[in-house]
Image: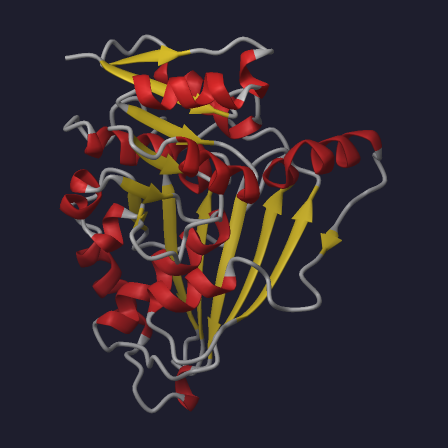
Amino acid sequence: MTHTLFIDGAAGTTGLEIIERMAGRSEFALLVLDDEQRKSPDARREAYHAADFAVLCLPDDAAIEAVALAQGSKVRIVDASSAHRTAPGWTYGFPELIGRDKVASARQVTNPGCYPTGFLALLAPLVRHGLLPADWPYVCHAVSGYSGGGKALIARFEADPDLAYRDYGLAMGHKHVPEMQKYAGLSFAPIFAPAVVPAHRGMVVEVPLHLEQMERAAPTDGLRDLLVDFYKDSGVVRVHEANPDELLLRRSASPSDRLDLYVFGARDGTQARLVATLDNLGKGASGAAVQSLNLMAGLPETAGLVL
């Protein structure tokens, strides 16, 4: 069976990468609008009402408008924006955490943010199973390639060879924080410290832990063992049981839909560093959307993914 797929915002970075992952796949037929039609609300409304599935690769306000255009149709939506990540009636598109059956049966799925994907993959299972406390003031340090900032940030980095590091979110209240707190089940909003470096793609997300200060914290080996067991059936998430001496983010990394997790610990057991590496355009965006689409369409979860 072939499913009709409409990508609203197909000319953007996320949309183009979804199209690449759909190349050669007979399970989906793309419904394509020309340049003029893409700007027409009437043409877009017709596309939503003609499609089986739609992916919103749009700014938040435009994604909200798109959902209104789709009202009354049978279309099932994956929203790659941040507009609906904590909204009622939307299923969080992280099947490893939320459950594959919930994503498969959902009508409206919201893609996780790229940074929250790494943060939640590390922390949520450990808090859920009581190996780390929910009532701890967690901190998340993260660095990403510049492609996650959209066309403006891509142009800024590519036009300025001296731009080596961009620290941002300094006023707190970053839009990713609510989903990080909600889906990790935390009592307090984490302090989120993101930054951008001159690599096109790639991401490192880290949660440092003061284990000796926590009344309810498992030792490092226990944290790792739980994550290994939690993701044992995943074809996307890999928990490394042997730790490297360093983790590298390369300027010219190839696309990937994998998510790699590490647990580093001090020899005396007092401290640990939970680290995730992923492609911000892969499992952090387009790959996650395709993974949800596969489940919603009753297809193998990893079909079309770059693993």
Question: Taking 94 as reference, is 47 left or right?
Answer: right
Is residue 125 something that shows in the picture? yes
Is residue 21 something that shows in the picture? no
Q: Position of residue 206 (x, y in %)?
A: 50, 61
Question: Taking 159 as reference, is 178 left or right?
Answer: left
Q: Is residue 223 above or below residue 150?
A: below
Residue at image location 14% in from the left, 13% down from the top: 1
The quadrant of the image that shows the C terminus is: top left
Residue at image location 46% in from the left, 48% down from the top: 277
Query: How many numbered discs, if any?
Result: 0
- Comparing 142 with 213, the one in front is 142
Q: How is the image coloured?
A: secondary structure
- Comparing 119 with 271, the one in front is 119
Question: Taking 50 as reference, is 62 left or right?
Answer: right
Q: Position of residue 9 (x, y in %)?
A: 52, 25
Q: Quadrant of residue 126?
A: bottom left
Q: Position of residue 148 (x, y in %)?
A: 59, 40
Q: Quadrant of residue 48?
A: top left
Q: Is residue 44 above or below residue 230?
A: above
Residue at image location 20% in from the left, 12% down from the top: 2
Q: Position of residue 237 (x, y in %)?
A: 30, 45
